[in-house]
Image (cartoon, rainbow, N blue to C red):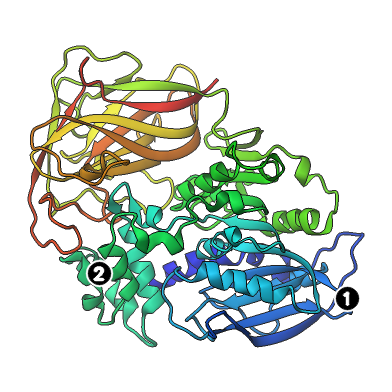
Amino acid sequence: MKNFIRLVFLLVAFPLLNSSAVNGQVRQNSDQPAYKVTEELDVRVEMRDGVRLSTNIYRPDASGQFPVLLMRSPYGNGGAGNREAAYAVTRGYVVVLQDTRGRYESEGLFDAMQPEAEDGYDTQQWIVRQPWCNGKIGTFGGSYVGFTQWMPAPEGSPYLVTMFPEVTFADLHDVVYQNGAFFLDLFGPWSYEMTSPYNSSLDSLMKQPDRILMHLPLIDQDKILGWKIPFLRDWMMHPDHDRYWDRTSIGDGYGKIKASVYAIGGWYDILLKGTIDNYLNMTKPEIAPEIRKKQRLMIGPWVHSMGNRKVGELDFGEAADLNDSELMMRWFDNQLKGIENGISEEAPVKIFVMGENVWRFENEWPLARTKYTKYYFHSEGNAPCISGKGILDNKPPAAEKTDSYIYDPANPVRTIGGMGPYDQQSVENRSDVLLFTTAPLKEDVEVTGPVNALVYASSSALNTDFTAKLVDVWPDGKAIRICEGIIRADHRNPLEKPSHIEPGKIYPFNIDLWATSNLFKKGHRIRVEISSSNFPRFDRNLNTGNYFATDTTILKAEQVIYHSAEYPSHIILPVIK
């Protein structure tokens, strides 16, 4: 687990690792000179409060000024002979790699993501005062390193020309909490890794992850580990989007950003929603037209590590391979050097259509030609488990029996396969998973865009969860997860304060399954799974109505799902003709 977490975040933090420079070869544009590299390591850059951050500088061995590529990372700033930095330096860039506050050689306390706006801005202002900077800065990196790009952007540095963030976000609260549910299997192990003492026994601890992830109360995970994680406790003490999160959210600051942005995400990425939200916020009507036209969005069939054709249990073909380093340099050459290479003339949105396994350029997101189509749930009370008879079609329901199941937090529905497209059949045999499935499709159906489910349900609990999953069922029975979502019952009204539900009362629950682009092929079937847990991706709702982080009591809950003329539960699919 420890090595996995480290690998995932390092892969997205250092996109240049995928470049040809790894093999010692540097490809040059014919109109650019090949520079040698000068290194300045562990330069101490002072922040406004006096804390000094360790910064490595890699620049051309030549006089003059150059555009600067900046990456600020909590995962280490490299060292001497950095071939990844050399890849850009030989093309005429200065590369600045910095350890974020409290990490590796940098001074200060590591308080995850809190100081990145101020520290990022101060670093940019320091860079432009250096004799080798021509006054133009581009930023790059993914995940946390993408977050370090977004946070200082509204601070208004006139020298920030462009950004190249991958698989990232700009509102920490809305990643840590998904409609009220805590994103456990990401921020639990990640926080353990980021705070583990030298020579800790984390690897052995994570061989039995349930010992930590199922421990109650949830806030005491660090006590099981044996070391303190103050920021994880802070996150759990602030489940609402209160003032605590202000320093880790752009909020209404997108209008202050003047930089061009090339954002990359993956349909199966754990941070997909953040990538899409950032693009949507930068292309809103109130954003100046000259800024809107400089925004780009690219989404492939990937998880949190980018550019692979084989993802989960599927091979998306040769087209899914991405050399993001070459793409990034093409973008920077255009935006920072004014090289006309065609990238600024491309349509602003580029998406990979899974199933068909092709790339397609689009003019907007969501697509203007989308036909939002309702697929209704039907059954005679026999939808539980794969042997049931739950039906999914376009006909509104009439008078139908309800479906019910018992949700037991002591035996939650498990997350299958982690990130990516994995066969879900092993959980579809459970009695607490409802299945609603179309007949075999008579023609291909492309689903591209945001996916939402409206589920009418009641519970015996004061608070509980409901989950929804969109699945592509292949002719051989394989059930591949496409996208999924969760909602905590007390967060059913996003514009109001969280409140308990009344046991037995019917409520509408709007479940956001984020987005996808998938071609459901002729002969395949479309399926929706409904349940009340997805563990350990999300924490278990204990059904008591008590505060989730400190609760130690487990109650079973009887869940009832309605599908009738009065309560027409359905999923809304963005169908593209």
Residue found at x 66% / y 69%: 70
Q: Is residue 63 above or below residue 572?
A: below
Which of these two is toward me, 325 or 370? Answer: 370
Residue drawn at 66 percent across, 63 percent down: 157
Q: Nearer the viewer, residue 238 or 87?
A: 238
Q: Which residue is mark 1?
A: 64
- Asked whether residue 274 appears in the rendered view, the answer is yes
Task: Determine whether, in the image, residue 386 is placed left or right of residue 334.
Answer: left
Q: Position of residue 360 (x, y in %)?
A: 64, 35
- Give the secondary structure at mark 2: loop
Against 525, residue 10 (above or below) is: below
Is 490 or 191 nearer to us in this picture? 490
Return the x and y of residue 252 as percentages of the image width and height: 50, 50
Q: CA distance from mark 1 to mark 2?
A: 56 Å
- Tell me the residue that label 2 is attached to: 208
Question: Which is closer to the viewer, label 1 or label 2?
Answer: 1
